[in-house]
Image (tube, rainbow, N blue to C red):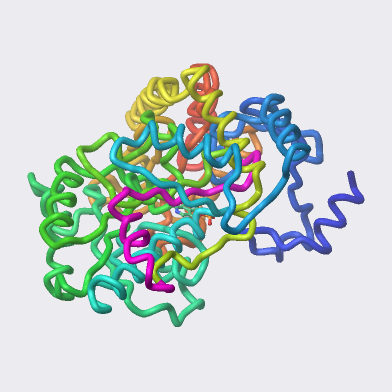
Amino acid sequence: MSGVIEADRRHVWHHLTQHKPYETIDPRVMIEGIGMRVWDATGKEHLDAVSGGVWTVNIGYGRETMADVIRDQLLKLNYFAGASGSVPGALFAQRLIEKMPGMSRVYYSNSGSEANEKVWKMVRQISHRHHGGKKSKILYRERDYHGTTFGALSAGGQAQRNAQYGPFMPGFVEVPHCLEYRSQWGPVDDYGERAANAIEDVILREGPDTVGCLCLEPITAGGGIITPPEGYWERVQDICRKYDILLHIDEVVCGMGRTGTWFGYQHYDVEPDFVTLAKGVASGYAAISCTVTTEAVFDYFRDDADDPLSFFRDISTFGGCTSGPAAALENMRILEEEKLVDNSARMGERLIGNLQALMEKHAVIGEARGQGLFAGAELVSDRESREPAPEALVKAVVADCMSNGVIIGAQNRSLSAGLNNTLLFAPALIATENDIDEITETVDAALMRIFG
Ligand code: PLP
């Protein structure tokens, strides 16, 4: 293994990583995964509480049937792109739409960023064709993240993620976050309504005839696991209808059972025009993302066939890889057969319950929040003032858990400096009670060691 580690040290540029420390310590190389557990190149076993680092491996590691269906599909027809469809592409689209009443069409590509870019391209084309170039602005929310490409960074509400990469694209406008724990109005009874009204204020400031789309995560992920406040989504829906603004819900993380329902938005009374999916679609066994739209959106591109520019002139080369939808079909079968969405809801309650119980012991946890197997614990120096805990100590908790065999997450230079103080948990949806308890017991011990 030393050859592999040396090759990695010399030639691989890791994601989200400052490489200087690798001059003196070995980079971590993962070798194998089974169920909830992974082994690294030193042979160390880890319980993975973040589903492959970034909340992706919803069905767990080492699934033989996933390998089987991918192999079979590769031998049958590995790829064909452009104007042609494929058998798994058609069948997965049908199965997906059955779970999303009101939605109707699936456009395939490879990453969450790309799926989101497709939406905004569609919105811009609708603007040109149907609103004389008006209604082209895209609203996004402070603390939300939508990907790494320039369009997605332009829609990025995380200051440190964006720092040093500008200038960004015009026509993207930020609306305020909806994290009640960090209320912009102090303690209020109607936080959800106020946070939604703040979106309306931005629309009125910009001019409703300039705004085409509002893009939101159903539950903000990397921005701190923000479960929306009471009444928020309902009011957001009203605002979109009132000003004829298309609603894009970014389910790249929350989709496919992560939050205890098939899709995060299904916790609320809301009807999106676009839904984007990626991570859990094939749980990292294949690269696939989906831009899902209503038939009404699709109709904008189907009508007026005499105009040679009327259709969506977009392609994703690897959106033609058939292993993606083949894997997605099997992934969905596993989620259904093993009732993993229900398990996410049940185990999620245990996870949040355990984290909230830790609050009695550790004053450093200011708030524990989440939905399904997607939870966060915000660390503070002082509960009264809610002063965020120093980021170095938040990182120390993650490192302590790692050295004790449990991989948890935390924000990494994403929000403004000082605000990256939330521990993140997103175990695979196969997690058992013992797994959940092992995760929170390890966090308990880490907090004890670091904060006393
Ligand atoms: N949207 C959300 C909510 C995300 O959390 C992410 C990635 O973490 C993305 C989009 C981007 O997905 P990808 O990294 O596949 O481009």
**Residue at position x 51%, y 17% in the image:** 337
Q: Quadrant of residue 126?
A: bottom left
Asked if one can make out residue 401 in the rendered structure from this viewpoint, the answer is no
Q: Judge whether 155 appears above or below 380 on screen.
A: below
Left or right of residue 87: residue 295: left
**Residue at position x 62%, y 36% in the image:** 326
From which residue to which does the magenta span run?
283-309
Asked if one can make out residue 109 in the rendered structure from this viewpoint, the answer is yes
Furthest residue in direction front, as rendered: 306
Furthest residue in direction right, as rendered: 3
Quick check: is 140 in the magenta stretch?
no
Q: Quadrant of residue 175?
A: bottom left
In this rendered view, identify the residue nearer to me: 282 or 146: 282
Furthest residue in direction left, as rendered: 189
Q: Position of residue 286 (x, y in %)?
A: 64, 43
Quick check: is 289 in the magenta stretch?
yes
Q: Position of residue 263 (x, y in %)?
A: 37, 37
**Residue at position x 60%, y 38% in the image:** 87
Q: Quadrant of residue 61?
A: top right
Left or right of residue 27: residue 59: left
Q: Position of residue 166 (x, y in %)?
A: 46, 80
Furthest residue in direction bottom, as rendered: 167
**Residue at position x 38%, y 29% in the image:** 260
Image quarter hosting the N terminus: top right
